[in-house]
Image: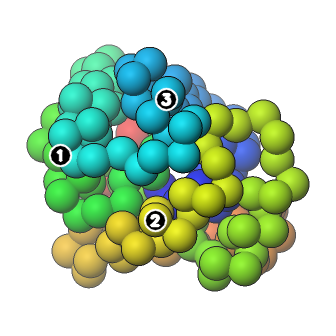
Amino acid sequence: MGVSGAGKTTIGSLLASRLGAEFIDADSLHPLSNVEKMAAGNPLTDEDRWPWLHVVGQTLQKAAAVGPEGTGLVIACSALRRSYRDAILAEAPRTFFVHLAGDEETLSHRLEGRSDHFMPTGLLRSQLETLEELDDDEPGARIDVAATIDHILDDSVRAIAASAVTW
C-alpha cells in the first residue's frame, strides 16, 4: 500500500515472486470511470473508491479461499485511509498491509521518471493529504522506500513472517 510513486507495482511483483505468490496490480481492478477521472487529474472520491475496494477485498479473499496452504496473493493497492483498509479487511481478514512509505521529494522524483502510468504527478499532494498511516492495531508494517530494493524486500518478507497472518 502507499501513494503513487512509492513502488507498489515494482516491489509488489518482486515480493510476490520471492514469496511464490501471484501478483495483481489493483489499478487493473478500477472501473474505467475511475481511470478516466484520475487520468484527467481529478482525485477519486470515497464514492468512487468503495466499489473498487470491494473488488480488491473479494479478490484477496478468493485467493485465501484456495486453502490454508494456498500460494498467496500480493496486490499493489493504495489503501490510503484506515476506512479503505477496513473495507478490504472486511472482505479478506487474512490481509497484511506493507506500507511503502517515503517523503514527498523522493516520491515526486520517482513519479517524474515514469511515463507509463495514468496517474498524473499532480495528484501526489492529494494522495499524501489523504494518507493515514497504519495504526498499531492494523495488520501491517511501514517500510521506508529510501532503502535499496533488496532491503525493502527483505524488510517486507521479515514483517510478513513475523505477523500472525498466514498464507
Residue identified by numbered label 2: 126
Query: How far apart are the alpha carbons under marks 3 and 1?
Result: 20 Å
- Point 22% across, 47% down: residue: 46
State the image coordinates of residue 17 (x, y, percent, origin top left). Answer: 69, 36
Residue displayed at 28% across by 47% down: 45
Tag 1 secondary structure = helix
Q: First in sequence, mark 3 or 1: give its number.
A: 3
45 relative to 91 in the view: left or right: right
> x and y percent of residue 116 in the render?
78, 34
Q: Nearer the viewer, residue 5 or 15?
A: 5
Quick check: 139 above or below 119?
A: below
Residue 44 at what x, y percent from top left? 36, 45
Residue that mark 3 sits on = 35
- The kind of secondary structure element at disc 3 is helix
Q: Residues within 10 Å of mark 1 (few under 14, many from 20)?
A: some
In the depicted view, which residue is nearer to us: 17 or 142?
A: 142
* Left or right of residue 86: residue 119: right
Left or right placement of residue 6 versus residue 46 in this view: right
> Is residue 112 in sight in this rendering?
yes
Residue drawn at the location 46% of the way across and 65% of the way down: 126
Residue 87 is tagged as: 1
